[in-house]
Image (tube, rainbow, N blue to C red):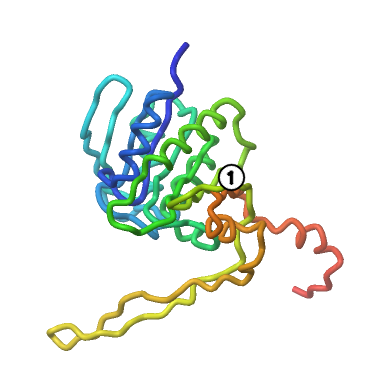
Amino acid sequence: MKRPLILVTNDDGVNAPGIVALYQSMCSIGDVIVVAPDKHQSGKSSAITPSEPIRLHLLRKEEGLTIYACSGTPTDCIKMSINQILGRKPDLLVSGINYGPNTAISVIYSGTMGAAFEGCINGIPSIGVSLCTYEPGADFFYASQFTQQLAEQVLSKGLPQGTCLNVNIPNGIINGVRFCHQTDGLWKEEFVKRTDPAGRNYYWLSGYYKNNEPENEHSDEWAVNNGYIAIVPCKIDFTDYDFLNNYKNLNYEL
């Protein structure tokens, strides 16, 4: 029997420690194609590159593992994989392991999840994985081993059409695994204004996250803050069906 074909990407760059740990663990269960950005691409969400050329560079090719660097975004990486690299649709896409959490509303900004959504759009069972730490030299071993187990489950059981998984793993003692909903919260953006040596103003994005439901034990923020791996099933269909189904009862004059 053929081994599963697993597509791996990230938004931290092709040489980031998280993706190295990830593709090493994926190699134990399938043939792995890595197509990842050649530089840091965090916060790119589902951005694409329509206005300049995209370049691919083959970095490594051996039995069961091929690695490409791509000059585009994480979503570009998936599009290029499907259209230019892969001979068939992969059995699984895994994006990560991201350096830092992608809980709550961060899912819509995340390049890690942008790649997972693109896989989902193309009918590929897709998982985005993040390790909830920014500590230098963080150890991705446990996160990669858990991702391997989850990948085996998804390869065996599949995912519903139009659904991918957003997985956030605490950095430390793990108390268990929880399927959760996305936390209600938002980033309160601020910009720090500075002046360069030429006297021109520039701005650094700053701010903090405001959790609107810190005590909600069904949310992903509560889960990771209490030592649980949080798995949120995410849909690519953004339609508000409650609103749609009740629209006939609303008196809108257009």
Q: Residue furthest right?
A: 249
Residue under the image location 24 percent in, 43 percent down: 55
Rendered position, 228 above or below 155: below
Element type at mark 1: strand
Q: Nearer the viewer, residue 73 or 178?
A: 178
Q: Nearer the viewer, residue 36 or 239?
A: 36
Q: Nearer the viewer, residue 141 or 34?
A: 141
Residue 192: x, y in percent? Answer: 33, 82
Residue highlighted by disc 1 = 177
Q: Residue furthest bottom?
A: 199
Rendered position, 94 above or below 74: above
Residue 184: x, y in percent? Answer: 61, 66
**Total number of numbered discs in the rendering:** 1
Residue under the image location 38 percent in, 24 percent down: 31
Q: Is residue 87 shown to the viewer in this render?
A: no
Q: Residue furthest top?
A: 1
Say which quadrant the C terminus sits in. bottom right
Residue under the image location 47 percent in, 45 percent down: 128
What is the quadrant of residue 94 in the picture?
Answer: top left
